[in-house]
Image: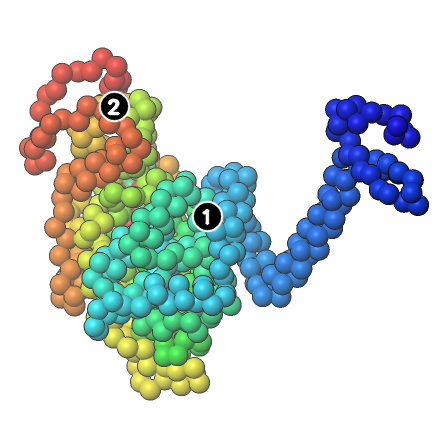
Amino acid sequence: MPSSGITAVDAAAKGMKLERYASGGALLLRRATSAKLVSASSHLLFRATVLATLALVFLFTLHYPSLLSRSFHLSAGGGGGADDGARSSASHRSLLMSSASYGGAAWEKEVRRSARPSRDGGISVLVTGAAGFVGTHCSLALRARGDGVLGLDNFNSYYDPSLKRARQALLASRGVLVLDADINDAPLLERLFDVAAFTHVLHLAAQAGVRYAMEAPQTYVASNVAGLVSVLEVAAKHADPQPAVVWASSSSVYGLNTDAPFSEDHRTDRPASLYAATKKAGEAIAHAYNHIYGLSITGLRFFTVYGPWGRPDMAYFFFARSIVAGEPVTLFRAADGSDARRDFTYIDDVVKGCLGALDTAGKSTGSRSGRKSGPAPLRVYNLGNTSPVPVTRMVAILEKLLGRKANKRVVTMPSNGDVPFTHANVSHAAHDFGYRPTTSLEAGLRHFVDWFVSYYKLDAKIAKPAAADDDKPAKKKKKNKAMSASS
Ligand SMILES: O=C(O)[C@H]1O[C@H](OP(=O)(O)OP(=O)(O)OC[C@H]2O[C@@H](n3ccc(=O)[nH]c3=O)[C@H](O)[C@@H]2O)[C@H](O)[C@@H](O)[C@@H]1O
């Protein structure tokens, strides 16, 4: 009988192991409980796991020290406007998405692959703000014609980062890599220039938005001033050879200028917002880097760019949302009672302007040694539509396309940095690289609404007019009782 007094059947039933040993002729029964075995093996497993984790952390820290600090940059920087939770979770996700590959051989290979042109004579462009609105469209267009494109974006939460992620996915499907990285991360920028021979930088990363500058002034300085300097520093002093830089300035630099249409020769010393002031500062900074380091620099003054994959912080975009949701839209009227007007410019026209500017940029003349062989190009161009439209008209077009009336509230323009009108003269861009905007606001907003409805899956909610004629005034439609129509 077993010395324990427990039968084999009982033991089996209780999950015990019975083992028999012959020792000195006596039958010994040794009992070991499953619990003990499990406990012993999990201790071993736990120790092994801890050791392996420590070893991995040690190796990781040795190989990717900059990544650990980058996670701080990403969560501390950014545009703001959304809660910190969203920002830090976006940063955390960014870290996860990039940590596997930053800095290693596989990462370098991917960077080179994305930056390499696929056509003879193609250019290689580092696009900052590549997951932004203009950045996405320019990157796609460059890629489509066989140029190399490597994108950077910090995916901040100034507006919905999931839209930026969707743009990133679209770019990835076309072979364009967009790294989670901040333009103020100078070591990373240097590393990129060591890995890939960029011929051009299309610098579009910025803190955009005129009115938000009153809420978060420091983010404008960090992105539009410090960030620009960071990019120009690397392009001027580290890249070898120096690339040509094309960057996004803004129509807002014309500020309180009253001469119209706005020409590049007009005054730009009266900005109406901090946003405009940082863009104006950028133009002065560009002058200095061109002068000292022989960097070829082109500033593009964009005029209220709109279209598919656009920015949700812009009026046409959030007006569309409000119209669909039946929420009020607030329209600003100039102090003299006139409607505010904008030279709304369609994204495809702007993309042509950006590519034209890249193609005609001309070479930088400086080198790492700090000497320049002669003067380099320094240019600035308006990229507008040349036909300002009242904001009230923009809303009327949206109403027609969405098949719903807006619930309008008209107020006198608050003192928020806005200017009453913009109007571009584009003769310099037309002369130098054949820039000719061709898209009417009606046609452009139709493309936007098509995208908007499909991206946000609004088809069921919106009965779009079958074939609205863009250029004729809206026909009277049956009033949908569910829609509010006060003005
Ligand atoms: O052209 C530019 O340089 C600038 O264009 C836009 O700035 P903005 O023209 O002010 O564009 P929106 O914010 O979309 O405003 C468009 C118009 O709608 C008006 N608006 C805006 C918001 C609102 O609630 N109500 C309203 O009537 C504004 O006064 C303005 O006349 C961009 O937001 C800037 O980043 C860009 O640099």
Q: Residue at x 78, y 31 (%)?
A: 16
Image quarter for ligand 1: top left
User: Which quadrant of the structure image shows residue 404?
Assistant: top left
- Judging from the image, what secondary structure is the residue with disc 2 in? loop
Quadrant holding the C terminus: top left
Q: Residue at x 13, y 44 (%)?
A: 440
Q: Residues within 10 Å of mark 2 (few under 14, many from 20)?
A: few
Left or right: 306 with respect to 22?
left
Rounded to the nearest whole Å, what is the CA distance between mark 1 and mark 2? 31 Å
Q: Residue at x 41, y 67 (%)?
A: 109
- Judging from the image, what secondary structure is the residue with disc 1 in? loop
Q: Amino acid at mark 1?
A: Asn
User: Which quadrant of the structure image shows residue 88?
Assistant: top right
Depth check, front residue: 257 or 122: 122
Q: Residue at x 49, y 60 (%)?
A: 101
Assess whether mark 2 and mark 1 are in contact (beta carbons under 8 angstroms): no
Q: Number of labelled discs?
A: 2
The residue to which callout 1 is attached is 156
The residue to which callout 2 is attached is 460
Depth check, front residue: 414 or 218: 218
Q: Amino acid at mark 2?
A: Ala
Left or right: 160 with respect to 5?
left
Q: Position of residue 407 (x, y in %)?
A: 28, 23
**Vertical arrangement, residue 27 with respect to residue 231, above or below:** above
Left or right: 123 with respect to 61?
left
Depth check, front residue: 480 or 180: 180
Quadrant holding the N terminus: top right
Find out if the beta carbon at label 2 lies less than 8 Å from the nearest ligand 1 atom.
no
Q: Residues within 10 Å of mark 1 (few under 14, many from 20)?
A: many
